[in-house]
Image (spheres, grey):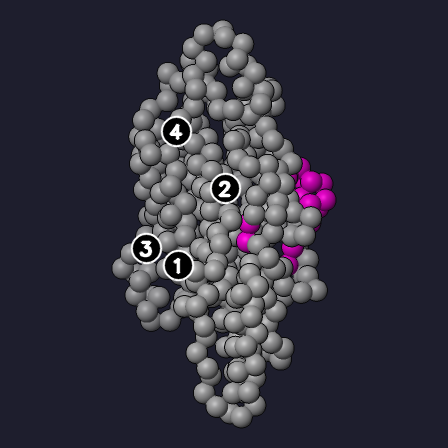
Amino acid sequence: MPLVAHTPLPTFQRLLAEGEDILNPDRASHQHIRELHIGLLNIMPDAALEATERQFFRLVGACNQIAQFHVHPFTIDGLERGPEAQFHISQYYESFEKIKLDGLDALIISGANVTHAHLSEEDFWQPLTEVFDWAKQNVTSVLCSCLATHALIEYCYGIERTPQPQKRWGVFSHKVLERTHPLVAEINTRFDVPHSRFNEIYQHDMEQKGITILAASEQAGVHLAVSSDGIRVVFFQGHPEYDDISLLKEYKREVIRFYNNERDDYPAYPDNYFDDKTKDLLSEHEKQVKVAKENKQALVLFPEQDILDQLDNTWRDTAKAVFNNWLGKVYQITNLDRRIPFMAGIDPKNPLGLRNL
């Protein structure tokens, strides 16, 4: 929870200038303790639908233990669904119409799988842009993950993502570039984030449109950025929500695709993810898979259980800290009525008052 500058003590101003969370007494007196309502627009494919729920729910649930969080999952049209996923959605998800009626304090938009060269050609593009338009007017802050970042930046800023020569895949080191911004307050100035994507929006393109880059990697590019107002839209290109096994599951899926002749080459390892012992196991498994494929034999068992204990999660603590900072700032500026984005006196163009620092 934030400190309240209830006296003229110079330390408060010093900490404020360093990016610490400091409230003046007037702001503090107008805050009401209530639950936060957070939407999760889940547009992941069926196989990852429930895992994506769990990943984002964990990050939200790890935030400030005083506030209570109500997470409202929903989805949109234009996504092909099988019967099991459709049943799950019909049983447990809310409709976008109900979301609009009740309101949200914050919104998370997941990544998605695509089938077209241009995002605007996807069947879900129009429904997704309708969510963007509504959230821009009615939600305090929207956090976009990977594909959602690319879609919103294309829709709102006119920047189309650039295909990469090869998949950006693995765990990469990032450096905080704007250390006084509240979203990166009190986190490590260097931290890891998983990435898994074939496309990228470059830092210079974002900056030309007024987007502020908070953290980037020399290898993987921008991970964390915010709209020019500082909070209304938060952009992730990486996947801090990933579990420690997420990249392993993706690698296993690609091995199966190779065996089934759905890709020509055997998949490379995700960068900076497997240790030498794991690589030895997987190298032996690769030989067995290739022999089984050539001889039309059954696919040999993937050595997942032998690998799990070798996987390290080097990004979770920072991911929790960023989410905690994000929802903490939303809590301080959102209206008591969740259908209204800001409390009285908050400037929508400068909600955090950052331009006064």
Sooner in the amino-acid sequence: mark 1 or mark 4: 1
In the image, is 200 to the left or to the right of 12? right
- Looking at numbered disc 1 in the image, what kind of residue is underneath it? Ala
Q: Determine whether 197 is above or below 296 in the image.
A: above
On the image, numbered disc 1 is attached to which residue? Answer: 51
Q: Is residue 310 among what the camera can see? A: yes
**Cα gap from disc 1 to disc 4, whole angstroms:** 31 Å
Q: Determine whether 69 is above or below 45 in the image.
A: above
Sooner in the amino-acid sequence: mark 3 or mark 1: 1
Which residues are drawn in magenta? 193-215
On the image, numbered disc 4 is attached to which residue? Answer: 335
**Residue at horizontal 67 percent and vertical 65 percent from the top:** 166
- Label 1 with label 4: CB-CB less than 8 Å: no
**Cα gap from disc 3 to disc 1, whole angstroms:** 15 Å
State which quarter of the image contains the C terminus.
top right
**Cα gap from disc 2 to disc 1, whole angstroms:** 20 Å
- Looking at numbered disc 2 in the image, what kind of residue is underneath it? Thr
